[in-house]
Image (tube, helix red, strand yellow):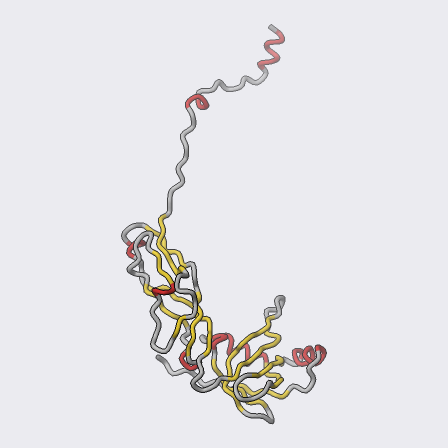
Amino acid sequence: MAEKKVVTLNAQLREGRGKNDSRRARREGMVPLTIYGGEGGAVSAVAPLRELAAILRSDAGHNAVFTINVEGGASSEVMFHDRQIDPIRGRLVHADLRRLVKGQKVEVTVALHLVGEPVGVRDEEGVLEQTTREIVILVDPRDIPESIDVDVSHLGVHDVLHVSDVKVSEGIEIVSAPETVVATVGVVREEVTEPVAAAETSAEPEVIGKGKQDEES
């Protein structure tokens, strides 16, 4: 596994906590933050939107672990706990950061990546369908995987793979319900078209103007 890059974010203490103060901070390219958990109390701060967005765009995304240095305060190793996104602009407008405690695992959501071609697809003309794309795991923050690979090459037609079948590395505990369906191989059934009744096909076509001819007769 490649060594994870250490990211450090510099922040400033947030003096005002009203809506006007938050709007002013956002106009200046800053995002209001709340840092809590661990051994310290809650801290209100602001940090550059550009740097926070870069962390969220990284491979680790919202599961990224990074260090935050608050001006005039102590440094803390943190990760995103919650975040608010502007629904119109799609921009981060507020974030809650959780301090990490050494030796304490965290509950996070990670993506499931299906690998391999199922036997039922290759040899039986089946179709692979993935019904669950993420699972919740309990893991040390420094060992959070970017995704979990799930081998589906052994699946035949009508076979079902459950969360209980997912293999994870040592130190990772799956929290999601074991009976949850992850993937299955189904069969595409061709739609059967019913034949048109002979009586319908041989029906006498309507004669346009027939009523007029009858009247003349």
Quadrant the C terminus occupies: top right
The residue located at (57%, 83%) in the rendering is 35
Residue 122 occupies quadrant: bottom left
Residue 142 occupies quadrant: bottom left
- Viewed as shown, does residue 199 lie left or right of 150? right
Where residue 182 appears, as percent x and y from the top left, is: 39, 61
Q: Is residue 209 above or below residue 133?
A: above
- Viewed as shown, does residue 136 lie left or right of 71? left
Query: Outermost residue, bottom direction?
Result: 72
Instruction: Tell which of 213 and 67 is nearer to you.
Output: 67
Q: Is residue 185 above or below residue 175?
A: above
Instruction: Tell which of 176 and 217 is nearer to you.
Output: 176
Where residue 188 appears, as percent x and y from the top left, is: 37, 47
The residue located at (42%, 77%) in the rendering is 139
Where residue 120 appears, as percent x and y from the top left, is: 30, 54
Where residue 112 appears, as percent x and y from the top left, is: 40, 66
The residue located at (32%, 54%) in the rendering is 121
- Viewed as shown, does residue 173 lie left or right of 82? left
Query: Outermost residue, right direction?
Result: 20
Quadrant the N terminus occupies: bottom left
Number of numbered discs overlaid on the protein picture: 0
Residue 6 occupies quadrant: bottom left
